[in-house]
Amino acid sequence: MTEVVVHDNESFEAALRRFTRKVQQYGILSEAKRREHFEKPSVRRKRKAAAKARRSSRSRSR
């Protein structure tokens, strides 16, 4: 679980920005959206294969 300690004289907005950055860095929201509905194993394989193809095409173009 992500937690942010609010320092003395720190505004709520600054603490919220740090919390949002941490949540995005750890991928918590994307994980929750992905787990929101059941994903068939065939769909999961296709999604992973597409991600792998994107990664390899990016590294090949450099």
Image (cartoon, helix red, strand yellow):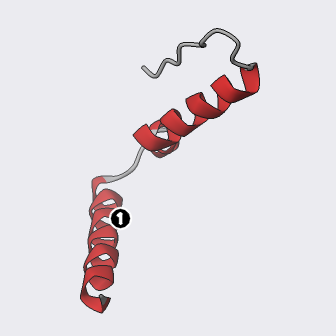
What residue occupies the far bottom of the structure in this picture? 61
Query: Which residue lies at the image location 45% right of the left edge and 42% below the top edge?
Result: 25
Crowding at mark 1 (Cα within 10 Å: few <14, some 14-19, many 20+): few
- The image quarter containing residue 45 is bottom left
What SS does tag 1 mark?
helix
Q: 11 or 29: nearer the eye?
A: 11
Q: 4 or 24: nearer the eye?
A: 4
Query: Which residue lies at the image location 28% right of the left edge and 54% below the top edge?
Result: 41
Query: Which residue lies at the image location 26% right of the left edge and 81% below the top edge?
Result: 59
What residue occupies the far front of the structure in this picture? 9
Query: Which residue lies at the image location 25% right of the left edge and 88% below the top edge?
Result: 60
Q: 40 or 15: nearer the eye?
A: 15
Location of mark 1 (residue): 47
Q: Amino acid at mark 1?
A: Arg
Q: Could you tell whether 55 is left or right of 17 in the image?
A: left
Query: Which quadrant would the N terminus be assigned to in this image?
Result: top left
What residue occupies the far top of the structure in this picture? 8
Q: Is residue 1 above or below residue 44?
A: above
Residue 17 in the image: state x and y as whole percent: 65, 33
